[in-house]
Image (cartoon, rainbow, N blue to C red):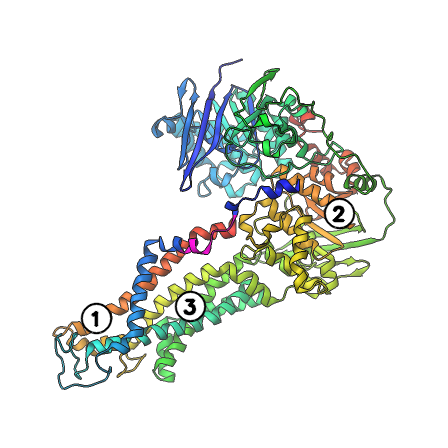
Amino acid sequence: MSADVLSNVSAADLAAPRQRRWRGFFAIPQAATGVTLLVLLLLMVVLGPFIAPDPPNKISDQPILGPSAQHWLGTDTYGRDILSRVLHGGASVILLPLLAVSVAMLVATVIGLLSGYLGGKVDAVVTWVINIALAIPSYLAVLVVVAAFGSGGLVVVTAVAVVYAPYITRVLRSATQAVAPREFVLAARARGESLSWILFREIIPNIGPTLLVEIALRFTYAIMFIASLSFLGLGVQPPSANWGVMVAQNRAMLLIHPVAVLVPALLIGVLAISVNLIADALTQFFGDRIHERLMV
Amino acid sequence: MTTPNLSAHDLSVGYRSRDGLTQVLADVSIELEPGRILGLAGESGSGKSTLALSLMGYRASGQEQLSGRVDFAGRALSGASIKELRRVWGSRLAYLPQDTATSLNPALTVESQMREVLRRHRGQDGAAAVRRGVEWLERVEIPQPQEAMRRYPHQFSGGQQQRIALAIALSVGPQVLILDEPTTGLDVVTQANINRLIVALVRDAGIASLYVSHNLALLATVCDQLAIMYAGQIVERAPAGQLYAAPRHPYTAALIEAVPTIEADRPPHGIPGIPRLSVPVHMCGFADRCRYRVAACETDIPLVPVGDGRTARCVRVDELPPFEPGRNDPAPAAGTAATVRQRAAEAVPAPAPAILAVDGVRCAFRRPGGAEFVAVDGVSLSVPAGRALGIAGESGSGKSTLLRAIAGLVRPADGTISFQGTPLAGLSGQRSVAVRRAIQIVFQNPDATLNPRHTIYQSLERPLKLFRPEVSRRDRREAVAEMLRQVRLSPDLLDRYPRSLSGGQRQRVAIGRALLAQPHVLLCDEVTSALDVSVQASILELLVGLRAERELTVVFVTHDLGVLRAVADEAIVLQNGVVREAGPTVRLLREPHDPYTKDLVSAVPSPRRAAEFLSGGA
């Protein structure tokens, strides 16, 4: 009978190659649009400082100029070239949220996994802390931190990480709870596997999709959040060429010289939208597959 | 012969997907007659549910009717507009699905659901509808029907929910009733009671019925006629009793031999291979698993009359030897699985020391809200080395919890579990490596037993890493491949992910994972209950064989008394966490003493005792 069993497995049973899965992802319109926009923006941010006509803070004697051949996007009140500032100012817009989300994600993953897997008292305490943290408005919490430690990139990153960690923890905790009672986890426990093996090798790969979608979504929020903080003067400080700071500084001349405000604002928006589109596509992509992977 | 109420002629149905058209039904002709129940049996993927839905004129998305027609009361149902179908559905053509979660609305009371159906299909409302509803709840034996009308579905047990769904379906007075596995998933005693009720009501009201199920013994017990489906075709059709006693098609015969029964003294036999999922082209669908295959099997094979009003779809139907269960059993030779089992069964209760002993174990959980729920309440048992103990019980009896306590996954609140005379720590993490290695567990659900993100090799390599350091890194792959061969799988599967394996294959991998630790005791938690009958039988054969080869001690948890009989030397019956009866399996099933055990045994459907079963058991 063994021969029969063996012959019944055909090549069609093989798992889909990685390549085909990626093609499946890009077939989702949001994915294609989001990734294209993000790649263009990243190119601009990475190459920007090299192709910018001027250093970001080079002051000229021609303030508040409209777009011209010399200054494509005009100049601001200090006579700085807006195009150059735009090309320089993207890095912090992307890096600070990325840093904040990464830190929040690291902390949240460990706590969420432990809380979801161990349950009991650990879970009770974690849930209690999360619930309290979630009750505090995000802006208020960050304002308090900034008031206490002063403004600036690092403080904002820490504050945003602390504010976002409970949200992510909550999501990962419930994802873990869904996987923890499954039989392959029980089998690992019966074998006497270590806690770290069970968390990182048995559970994490199975909540990967949730993790990825959550990262992308939180990243969108963080971009908007930190850009708003910079606008309010709590984040990146002038004279840095941060897009949020540029919107804040140039808003006084919105009516006479709208390009100076609109371009950086638009770029922040496009960045947030592109990441959001990717998050959306990931949700769809894994939604189709989560069933395949976990249930069937 | 009365005129059929509902009939299908040469019905062929396919599903269209991105990969093209897959035919799932081919040339199916059946007719349902008033007051008669036609049983439709088949394994998963045989097309039986598609047939049931097609008979109602239902077309799932992507589903295409390729040929044939369905007639209901002289009118074509296939091709009827949705408007016409809606007039028929529910009023004259009723459907009872397996899961009441899909047939009852959890947000509405029984009364409002009953009234809605009666208003829609009979124009009855108000007091008249309520009266009729109460009357029907009474007929399906719901206690306090007036009261029950005001309750919500979740306030009833699973069995009662199915009774209510049946009452709602029948209250309208349909001419045809289609039952799709209506009692699958319910406890065996509940199943028996509901099936008795269905048969009585259907015969009484003269409703033409189709009963779809994977449980051949059940169908042979409750139906008048039986049709066997395989790969989208009806392969045999006969009066139920005759078909079960003397099948003519090799698949039917193999299927009957695969069903573990509590009566026969023969172990179930698996059918090699895995069930075919689509309609065969110019050949017999069963040919690649059939032991009687000849060249002539590779043609289109018609369903031909074979006498006594029976039909079968096999070219060799006239030359095949008469059915004789167990005829193909290998002659018992020393050391084979069969003789080991026999010896074990005949042996006087051996004074062999218990390798595993459970003494007064009690497991309790705290429910949200603080109330304590006792799953296992003071169970004691002992298993001598090399024997197989079966633990039988219905869902909620505590049998799985008990097994998990032995495996160290649940900490007992009280009592001790000892292995080779030494009491064990409560949780596996506190036990020694040697003990963890010696006691291995295999789980029920083939979909969850392997980590979906680990390859088969990654899953199988763990026990070697943890328990057998003597196997060097280099030899591990070979050891794992060898284990796959032992559980009758191809080593080619090593780098596959579980999703590309069938349920039976995954369960074999899980058994292999347990055996790689070279355990003394193998704990099996309903390991076959999610599998098709033919696959279940091969897994049982595998376990019985491995047990003999490796002198394993086995503790096997099951709700199926037939399976219990097939694997266990001794058995205990659990109810609500308490042992009701214990003893040698054969004697326990033949002469149960405890009233609960008696109920369980008499609830097992038996074609030979069909009349007795339908009249309410012992």
* Residue B405, position as x, y percentages in the image: 69, 56
Chain identity of mark 3: A
Residue B547 is marked as 2
Q: CA distance from mark 2 to mark 3?
A: 55 Å
- Element type where label 3 sits in the image: helix
Residue A263 is marked as 1
Report the front residue among A82 and A294. A82
Task: State the image quarter where residue B264 is shown.
Answer: top right
* Three-letter amino acid code at the position of disc 2: Arg
The C terminus of chain B lies in quadrant: top right
> Which of pointers 1 and 3 lies earlier in the amino acid sequence?
3
Residue at the spot x=56%, y=63% of the render?
A201
- Element type where label 2 sits in the image: helix
* Three-letter amino acid code at the position of disc 1: Val
Chain identity of mark 1: A
* Residue A14, position as x, y percentages in the image: 52, 49
Q: Is A295 rendered above or below residue B167?
A: below
